[in-house]
Image (cartoon, rainbow, N blue to C red):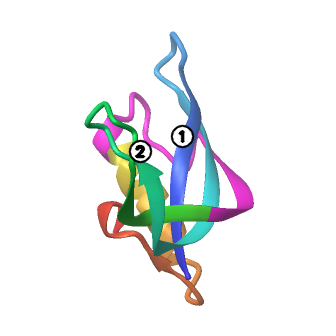
Amino acid sequence: MQTDYKVARMTRHDDGRVEVVARVYEGDVTTELEPSLDGRGLPVPVTRYRRTRFLRTVTLSLPDLPLAATEAQVRRRLNDELKKDTTRTPIVEQV
């Protein structure tokens, strides 16, 4: 199984604090039929990562994040959260 996160909310406070709420999911790469985007809507096989189950909610703020954390710092910290689960592999985009 693979895991990924989706940021549900990011709040930047006037004093520089950043609070992030993210949801962690598991899923796998599968091929399923989806309507084509060519206007005809005929089903075509599409292979991609698909979420199958919600795992948990992660909330980050001080001291997890530095004051005035950048988006890159938030992503790195969330990527680190995914690495803690050694039974699953993070998706390539969130390693």
Residue 76 is tagged as none
The percent coordinates of residue 95 (x first, y second) are 34, 69
Mark 2 residue crowding within 10 angstroms, few (<14) / some (14–19) / many (20+)? many
Q: Nearer the viewer, residue 13 or 29?
A: 29
Q: Does the magenta stretch include residue 68?
A: yes
Q: Going 61% across and 69% down the picture, which residue do you hit?
A: 26
Q: In this view, does 31 lie to the left or right of 70?
A: right
Q: Say which amino acid is labelled 1.
A: Val
Q: Nearer the viewer, residue 3 or 67?
A: 3
Q: What stretch is highlighted in magenta?
A: 52-72
The residue to which callout 2 is attached is 74
Dot 2: element: helix
Quadrant in the rendering for residue 36: top left
The percent coordinates of residue 58 (x first, y second) are 66, 52
Residue at the farthest top position: 14
**Quarter of the rendering occupied by the N terminus:** bottom right
Of circles 2 and 1, which is in front?
1
Contact between marks 2 and 1 (CB within 8 A): the answer is yes
Q: Alpha-carbon distance for marks 2 and 1?
A: 10 Å
Residue 57 lies, with reference to residue 80, above or below; the image says above
Residue 91 lies, with reference to residue 9, above or below; the image says below
Residue 91 lies, with reference to residue 70, above or below; the image says below
Q: Which of 56 and 20 is in front in this view?
A: 56
The percent coordinates of residue 61 (x first, y second) are 59, 40
The percent coordinates of residue 9 (x first, y second) are 59, 30
The residue to which callout 1 is attached is 7
